[in-house]
Image (spheres, rainbow, N blue to C red):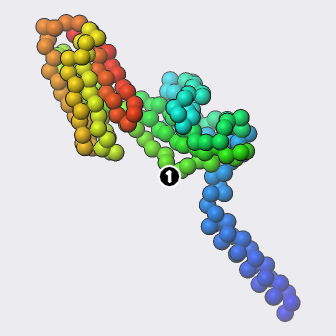
Amino acid sequence: MKTIKKTVLVVVFMFGTLVNYANNSELKNVLNANKTKVVFKGAKKGQQLTIKDENGVVLHFENINKAGNLVKFFNFSKLNDGNYTLELEKDFEIVIKTLTVKGDSVTFNEDSKKVIFKPVIRNEENKLMISKIAFDKKPSEIYIYFNDEIIFSETVKGDDILNRVYSLDQDVKGSYTVVLHNNGRSFSNDFEI
């Protein structure tokens, strides 16, 4: 009888510990600031990894030198308490993860992970084509420059997918630049006609 009571008591104690651990889901995301593992899937050679503070100041930048899953270890223990972003800039998207440093611990904010799709800007003869996925529906500002002077600007609001085609005068030869502002970021492309 005593054995059954002890077994039941141990099972209840273990169940209580398991429930307490399950309710505290943040425990699995809290890491040691001295050695924090960062993983990005599907990285390619030539892409860029950037770490920024909450003011946008770049603290670390590197070009990726091999394809595959990017696994890096960082020492965040010398950073001030606050929020930081890790950004992997890929060919057509920017994957952003955020983390919070507090004392000797680092917590990844899984809910704030996001992807920003970069615009595709191309020109064929005198046609300028701009495409961009914008699921957040934030406005995009488009500027077209010819020889460093603005010749066209437009603000596009509320579209999930931005598709624009601009006809340029094929007789006006020279250097063109397209600048697109979206999500607090700028993307540009230079070309010649």
**Direction bottom: furthest residue:** 1
Residue displayed at 13% across by 7% down: 171
**Direction right: furthest residue:** 2
Residue 23 located left or right of residue 75:
left
Residue 36 vs residue 144, the one in the foreground? 144
Residue 172 vs residue 123, the one in the foreground? 172
Find residue 58 and report its horizontal and vertical position in percent. 56, 27
Residue 184 located left or right of residue 36:
left
Q: Which residue is mark 1?
A: 111
Find residue 36 and report its horizontal and vertical position in percent. 68, 41
Find residue 139 and report its horizontal and vertical position in percent. 29, 38
For the C terminus, the quadrant is: top left
Find residue 109 and report its horizontal and vertical position in percent. 55, 49
Does 147 appear above or below 155?
A: above
For the N terminus, the quadrant is: bottom right
Residue displayed at 22% across by 25% down: 153
